[in-house]
Structures are given as C-alpha cells and as structure tokens.
Amino acid sequence: MILRISLPLVVASFLLLAGCSGDEGTKEQSAIDKQNERTAKAAVEAIKTPIDKARVVADQQVDHNRTLKEQTTDR
C-alpha cells in the first residue's frame, strides 16, 4: 500500500524538478528587448536625477535654517 502511494509521488516530484532545470534564462534578448531595456534605464535616470538634486537642495536648506536658528539663539 505504501509503495503504491509513494511511487507516483516520487515520479511526480522527479518530473517536476526535471522540468524546472533553469534553461529559460539562457535565451538571448532580442533587439527590441535590448532597446526597451535601454529606454527604461534612460527614463529612470531622467526621473531620478531631478529628484536627487531636489533632495540635495532640501538638505542644504535645512542646514542653512539650522545655522540661522543657532545664530539667533546665541544672542
């Protein structure tokens, strides 16, 4: 009885693991996929650059405000 149940489970698990060998990742990208990747990276950079610059300016403003506050409380 145990052999009857375990044998199909062993065969099924073997087929499942053999089917997921990882061959799908070796496929080379097409020219369209490569261009889409480049365009996506350029779009991300176009969005990130102004945001990063705005963060730098905001940090500078906070530092400036802190300096002014320290100068006024020292008097």
Image (spheres, rainbow, N blue to C red):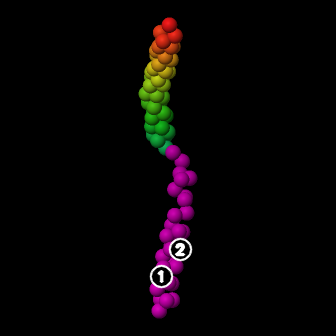
Which amino acid lies under the numbered mark 2 shown in the image of this protein?
A: Phe
**Circle count:** 2
Res 44 label = none
Dividing the picture into quadrants, the one containing residue 46 is: top left
Q: Residue at x 52, y 56 (%)?
A: 24
Res 8 label = 1
Q: Gap in Å between the C-alphas at discs 1 and 2?
A: 10 Å
Q: Can the viewer see residue 16 in this picture?
A: yes
Residue 8 place in picture, x, y as percent: 47, 82
User: Badge 2 is on which residue?
Assistant: 14
Q: Residue at x 45, y 37 (%)?
A: 36
The secondary structure type at the circle numbered 1 is helix
The residue sitting at the bottom extreme is 1
Sequence-first tag of 1 and 2 = 1
Along the line of sight, which residue is nearer the eye, 35 or 21? 21
44 is higher (above) or lower (below) than 13: above
Please say whether residue 3 is one of the residues in the magenta stretch.
yes
Along the line of sight, which residue is nearer the eye, 47 or 19? 47
Residue 55 place in picture, x, y as percent: 47, 23
6 is higher (above) or lower (below) than 16: below
The residue sitting at the top extreme is 75
Residue 43 place in picture, x, y as percent: 44, 30
Please say whether residue 28 is one of the residues in the magenta stretch.
yes
Residues in magenta, as a range? 1-29
The secondary structure type at the circle numbered 2 is helix
Label 2 CA crowd tier, 10 Å (few <14, some 14–19, many 20+): few
